[in-house]
Amino acid sequence: MLQSLTLDTDPEAYLELHRMLDEPVADAGLTDRELDLRQRTRSVVAHDVAPRAAETDRTGRFAHESYQPLVAAGLGGILFPRHLGGSADTTVAYAVIMEEIAAGCGATSLVYMTQTHAAYPILVAGSPQLQTHYVPGLLRGTAYGSMAITEPDAGSDVSGLATVATTDAGGYRLSGAKTFITTGDRADVIVCFATTDRSAGRAGISAFVIEGTWPGVSRGRPFQKLGMNGSSTAEIFLDDVPVPVSHRLGSEGEGWSLVMRSVVKSRISAAAQGVGLAKSAYARALLALRRLHGARLPDQTLATLAELRGRILQGRLLLHAVARQVDTDSDVSPGQIGLMKQSCTDLGWHVADASTRLLGTYGDLEVLGIERCLRDARVTQIYDGTNEIQRMLIGREITRAMDGLR
């Protein structure tokens, strides 16, 4: 009965269902340009991303063929200036686009956002020469990029980085190992964070742009993972890699502040994935329930669907509100970003889990794609700062607010 569901392989059915799930109260806060970009993205996803999603997940093949139509449609440089090949759009537009891509294929959304994450520090702290040399290729998809922060013994605590950059004639030598690096096995451009002064803690972290083909750079085989299988994750090894001073991002010791500026965008990316995966799981559950029960669903099922619809709307409104604040206020607090990231990625997991349970014994069928949403959602709660870290940041803000009470 359910084996012939065609949400992923029928673009018109995909578009019709997702139009039905649009919420006017959320759309009212979007500009005409943001709505247009959403529609453009949704069309590309329906025709070129969603039809490949199941096979990409099953084979673990890198989602190159799904990512390229997005950049061909002019969606690769949403947050970047036009002179570098971007479209200079809003953070809200980026969040809306990320949500649409994640709804069609979580892995493709991870490839897409990693390109932004690699290019953004170069835009923020790179020289004009570094910007023009590296950013356009990342936005066009002719080069792939990675952010190399995480290490075997240093994940969320960047101040504990063991990778070192020692001064050398005309530059630096980088040595160390990075792990869980998205696109790390194939990255042409790597933004690498390393310790330049161990005694200075966070103030001793610096950032560099290196290339994957440089002497001393090697990679491990991609990890086998629970989800996001069309996005590779691997180790990067640095063995006395020579790096010119001109490839340092900002001044020595500014790496920590660059990480903090960058995580605003990366946590918006993860939050948007959470909302997109939640919407995808909900849409797939509706389609399957319609096939199983017809137009009149059991009251208990309707009650659960009502709860899930409300949660998805709340998550979308929170995502858009924080993204709009980022566009209009440079002083968005870590707690506010953390509240969005934790809430929206927990949303993705919760809705995907509830959707599988709604369908009972059918819930884990691969053909429905809900179990893929569930697997993909799990890692969004972990990367870009675990949700436990986000709760800690939120708690610190609560404590400071309480200190101000009389």
Image: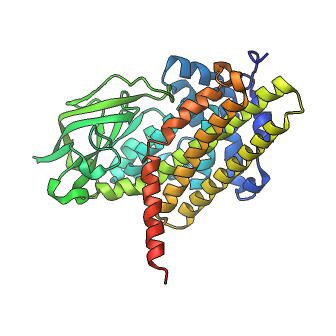
Residue at the image point whose x is 28% and y is 29% from the top: 213
Q: In the rendered view, would you say 3 is above or below 227? A: above
53 left or right of 223 in image = right
Front residue of 311/69: it is 311
Q: Position of residue 349 (x, y in %)?
A: 58, 39
Q: In the rendered view, would you say 346 is above or below 397? A: above
Front residue of 326/179: it is 179
Q: Is residue 12 visible?
A: no
Q: In the rendered view, would you say 289 is above or below 169? A: above
Q: Position of residue 259 (x, y in %)?
A: 36, 53
Residue, far bottom: 406
Residue at the image point whose x is 48% and y is 67% from the top: 398
62 left or right of 244 in image = right
Front residue of 218/243: it is 218
Residue, far front: 300
Residue at the image point whose x is 50% and y is 40% from the top: 380
Q: Position of residue 99 (x, y in %)?
A: 62, 43
Residue at the image point whose x is 42% and y is 33% from the top: 143
Q: Position of residue 283 (x, y in %)?
A: 73, 35
Residue, far left: 169
The type of colouring in the image is: rainbow
Front residue of 118/380: it is 380
The image shows a total of numbered marks equal to 0
If the image is split into quadrants, where does the N terminus sit? top right
Q: In the rendered view, would you say 83 is above or below 43? A: below
112 left or right of 129 in image = right
Q: Is residue 144 visible?
A: yes
